[in-house]
Image: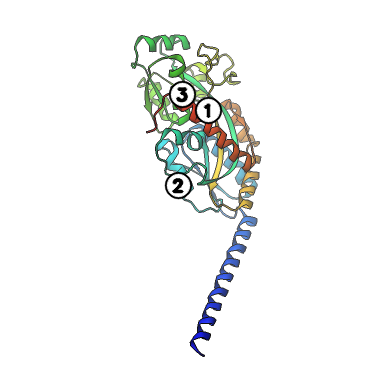
Amino acid sequence: MNTSLQGMTSRRHALAVALTAALCAGFAVQAQASDYPAKPITFVVPFAAGSATDQLARALGQSVTNDSKQSVIVDNKAGASGMIAAQQVAKAAPDGYTVLITTNTTQSANQHLYKKLPYDPVKSFEPVTGLGKGGQVLVVNSSAPYKNVGDLIAAAKAAPGKLSFGSGSSSSRVAGEMLKQLAGVDILHVPYKSNPLAITDLLGGQINMMITDTATGVPQIKSGKLRALGYSTQTRSPQLPDVPTLDEAGVKGYDMGYWFAAYVPAGTPKDVVARLNALLKNATTSEAANSFFQNSGSEAWSTTPDERGRFQITDAQKWGKVIKAAGIQPE
């Protein structure tokens, strides 16, 4: 066989191999999507065990396990304002088996709080669904002298920079910064890896106040260890009906909520995303999830993947405006 024929035969063989590989890969993706889930799923949570996001992830995991017959592993990767967890999921295989159960902290706020992120809130992920939303509560130690928001603001104005507030998430931090801005006070910010850790120091007297998610704060309020002074949205919490909103308490215009949502790595097959969307939507109506929503004062909130993606873009713009207005400089 002459050299030209040999070359042509080699090229044809290489092309056939490439086409076969492509077809096999396509069939593998189809099989993967139709069989999903065929092994345990990992829910990566950006905050510590006991946080609101962790509680919701575990409640949802129970339902997904029951429906799919596959176990759900909750992997808490707290720290760096959720960036450690988000980066881990962004780099994971796009097969639907690594799911980020997160909040506006990683997907809307961080891009305005940090000069550089190890992930892209939009390009690194496929949105799956919204999961829930709610408000936050301003709390102080029950032994503190502040009986209401007016007392706290008066104390802060009398001693600028002497009082401190803790935060273990971007939602908590921006809520505190918004209070400073709208009330015209200077309060020192103390960062934590998660809200439960900040609560521990608040109980121990290391910080003076914080604005935390209701899932973390309500149990401590009902036990009498913390005193609730104000609620962060324009509507009172059903869990704390006697606690005025911060707007009602004199901080006019105050309104700051939070949300939970699920994401998978960019490139995850659409059929897998659709199946996960269905599993999680059903999970938000489960008994365990309903218990979480009722106890935390939040509510279920499901979306399609496209709705989730569109909401994130507009929500990120809103957070950007709030953060800039609060005078927070990117770190």
Q: Looking at the image, tell me whether mark 2 or mark 3 is earlier in sequence order.
A: 2
Is 297 above or below relative to 40?
Answer: above
* Residue in view at x 59 percent, y 40 percent: 309
Marker disc for residue 88: 2
Q: Can you see residue 225?
A: no
Marker disc for residue 288: none
* Residue in view at x 61 percent, y 34 percent: 289
Q: Could you give the CA–CA distance between mark 1 and mark 3, rounded to whole angstroms? A: 27 Å
What kind of residue is marked 3? Ala
Q: Could you give the CA–CA distance between mark 2 and mark 1, rounded to whole angstroms? A: 25 Å
What kind of residue is marked 1? Ala
Q: Could you give the CA–CA distance between mark 2 and mark 3, rounded to whole angstroms? A: 31 Å
Please tell me whether mark 2 sits on a helix, a strand or a loop: helix
Left or right of residue 77: residue 43: right
Foreground residue among 94 and 68:
94
Q: Looking at the image, tell me whether mark 2 or mark 1 is earlier in sequence order.
A: 2
| In this rendering, the label closer to the viewer, 2 or 1 | 2
Q: Can you see residue 103?
A: yes
> Dot 3 corresponds to which residue?
325
Where residue 24 sits in the image (x, y, percent)?
59, 67
Position of the C terminus by quadrant: top left
Are discs 2 and 3 less than 8 Å apart at CB?
no
| Category of crowding for the residue at label 2, using alpha-carbon neighbours closer than 10 angstroms: few (below 14), some (14–19), many (at least 20) | some
| Category of crowding for the residue at label 1, using alpha-carbon neighbours closer than 10 angstroms: few (below 14), some (14–19), many (at least 20) | many
> Dot 1 corresponds to which residue?
215
Where residue 303 sits in the image (x, y, percent)?
64, 38
